[in-house]
Image (cartoon, rainbow, N blue to C red):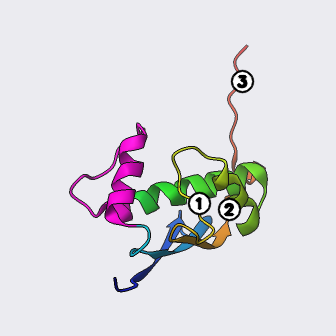
Amino acid sequence: MIKMIKTYTFDYNLGDAKVSFKVDTSIFTKELAQATLDFFTWDAGYDEDEDPIDEVMRKYAIEAIRIATMNWCGVEGVISEFKNKEGYASIDGSMGIQLESIRSYEFDENEMSVSIEV
């Protein structure tokens, strides 16, 4: 089988958060991606007409940014957290998905508004 590497870079809100993966589609196949999509009940769903690998990588991007933000961690921390997540493939490269870089979302308390009712 020919090795096919795709690079996925996801940007959230014009650089507020960013994540990049390399995917070897000869290892992480469409069948594995579809099994991942079928395993979960996705709040936002997914487009069944699109490539299942593309759809899974969108889900992985959201989860990776969520983990990086909640745990204040970088690439190694996110990779470690994914190893314990049921239904997700490891993102250390061993299953064809390698997390390359991540920038978590940073909250700015000055951007938060409040409404108080008494």
Please count the marks in the image.
3
Q: Would you place residue 26 above or below residue 45 in this image?
A: below
Residue 100 against residue 33 in the figure, above or below:
below
Mark 2 or mark 3, which has the lower sequence index? 2
Residue at horizontal 51 percent and vertical 57 percent from the top: 60
The one of 111 and 33 positioned closer to us in this rendering = 33
Report the magenta residues as a range.
Answer: 29-55
| Distance from the alpha carbon under mark 2 to that under mark 1 | 7 Å
Residue type indicated by callout 3: Ile
37 magenta-colored: yes
Q: Nearer the viewer, mark 2 or mark 1?
A: 1
Q: Is residue 58 left or right of residue 12?
A: left
Q: CA distance from mark 2 to mark 3?
A: 40 Å
Q: Is residue 92 left or right of residue 110?
A: left
Residue displayed at 25% across by 61% down: 50
Viewer can see residue 67: yes
Q: Earlier in the sequence, mark 3 or mark 1?
A: 1
Q: Secondary structure at mark 2?
A: helix
Of badges 3 and 1, nearer the viewer stands 1
The x and y percentages for residue 45 are 35, 44
Q: Quadrant of the C terminus?
A: top right
Percent x, y of residue 2: 35, 86
Q: Earlier in the sequence, mark 2 or mark 1?
A: 2
Quarter holding the N terminus is bottom left
The residue at which mark 1 appears reads as: 90
Decide: few, some or many residues near mark 2? Use Cα within 10 Å; few <14, some 14-19, many ≥20.
many
Q: Are marks 2 and 1 in contact (CB under 8 Å)?
A: yes
Q: Identity of the amino acid at label 2? A: Ile
Q: Residue at x 50, y 69 (%)?
A: 10
**Label ID, residue 79:** 2
